[in-house]
Image (spheres, rainbow, N blue to C red):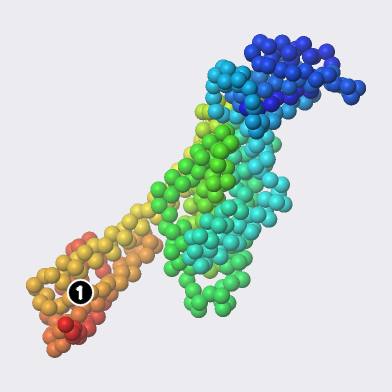
Amino acid sequence: MRLVQVFVPQDELDLVLETATAMGLDYAVTEETSRGEFEALVSVPVPPAAVEPFLSSLRTAGLDEDSYTVVTATETVVSNRTDELTGQFAGTRISREELQARAADLAPAASTYFILLVVSTAIATAGLLLDSAATIIGAMVVAPLMGPALAASVGVVVDDNGLATRGVGLQVAGLVVSVATAAAIGWTLRGTVLLPPGFDITTVPQITERITPNVLALFLALGSGVAGVVSLTRNVGSVLVGVAIAVALVPPAATAGLGIAWGHPMVVVTAGTLALVNLLSINLTALILLWVSGYRPDRSDRIQRAYGQLRSRIVVLLVAIGLLSVVLGGVTYGTYQTAAVEHDVKTELEAMSDDPAFGDLQFRESDVAYELVDVYTGGQPSVTVLVERPPGEREPSGFVDEVRERLEAATGVDLEMVVELVDTQRSG
């Protein structure tokens, strides 16, 4: 339930009471004795779904816009009359006015926002370098990224340009700050005793996950945007949803920063693309879902303008996501190709170990050097195979070429082949 309190200006008490009566709402009137411009305070208990119709009716009736209308959430209401009201005003979403106020509250002051963002990025960067998923998730609890993302979308659908501009500005600045923070930390730590000599960030699994993004990664961003709107409009689980949104944005941004520190352009491009696609996808789903949920400006003459802004932003977001998704698609295809070569090599070596044509030779291990960039630059996969043979046994003539031909036939690509033969004795 909500308690709507209207500070009634002079000579407008009848207007407020008639509006409440027409909607079948109960009310209590408190006479104002402060000798101010208000003659009374009217308190009206209503279900959440009735707040927006009641406030709209007051505006339509001509309530002075300079008056105060305060909406507060009630902890407990003890009355048999609430069931009737709840049945009369069905629905679960909050009012437009509450939505707007909550979105503004979720976007903190700039100083608070950037302090928390720097701290969360620093923790996430450490988690990436340590390959610690728990540390990365812990950092997301601190990240304040949910508010700006939702504030930007709410500002568009309710035609609040100030809120929309602030939300977009905080998101863009936040992404830049995250990348810069991670780059500064990476540059500071590189070459110190805190990291092993010759440390390569591309070999860390948590970082590899962000530099080889799959198109399926979009589901995290799209789902986070939907969950963010649901949590905002229904006031549930905002902390956990904020973590999901932060996971989609901070780790890839921090990875891009590490790519700058280590001088890896490919890391910057892939991780940066993932961060941008996630950011745009969250905003896209939030915009669409808020509009579909029925949120509009408070004045009918502004609805068309809000719809025009919404439509133009959706088009821009779709085009941007489509262009950036080309990179994600390329990474997805390249990652598939490299994984397919490794799988085919392993499968064929197992078949060759069982092939009588190779006698007692056993193909035990293989190392496939085939990177994502090789798929698009025409680089050949380099395969190193370890072959065990009984002592004194000689390999067949042309053995290396035969192994290469078998593996090339299995993988469908040309290979650079190295075969290491090891004389092996095994004790029973």
Q: Position of residue 243 (x, y in %)?
A: 55, 49
Give the quarter of the figure containing the C terminus: bottom left
Q: Residue at x 31, y 60 (%)?
A: 339
Q: Secondary structure at mark 1?
A: strand
Q: Residue at x 64, y 26 (%)?
A: 78
Give the quarter of the figure containing the N terminus: top right
- Residue 112 placement, left or right of 391: right
Q: Residue at x 77, y 26 (%)?
A: 68
Q: Residue at x 15, y 70 (%)?
A: 352
Q: What residue sits right under mark 1 in the picture?
A: 363
Determine which quarter of the picture holds residue 384.
Answer: bottom left
- Residue 319 placement, left or right of 169: left
Q: Position of residue 62 (x, y in %)?
A: 74, 15
Q: Position of residue 245 (x, y in %)?
A: 54, 47
Packing grade of label 1 (10 A; few <14, some 14-19, many >=20) is many
Q: Is residue 251 above or below residue 303?
A: below
- Residue 211 seen in render: no
- Residue 119 placement, left or right of 136: right
- Residue 265 placement, left or right of 180: left
What residue occupies the far right of the structure in this picture? 35
Q: Is residue 61 above or below residue 421?
A: above
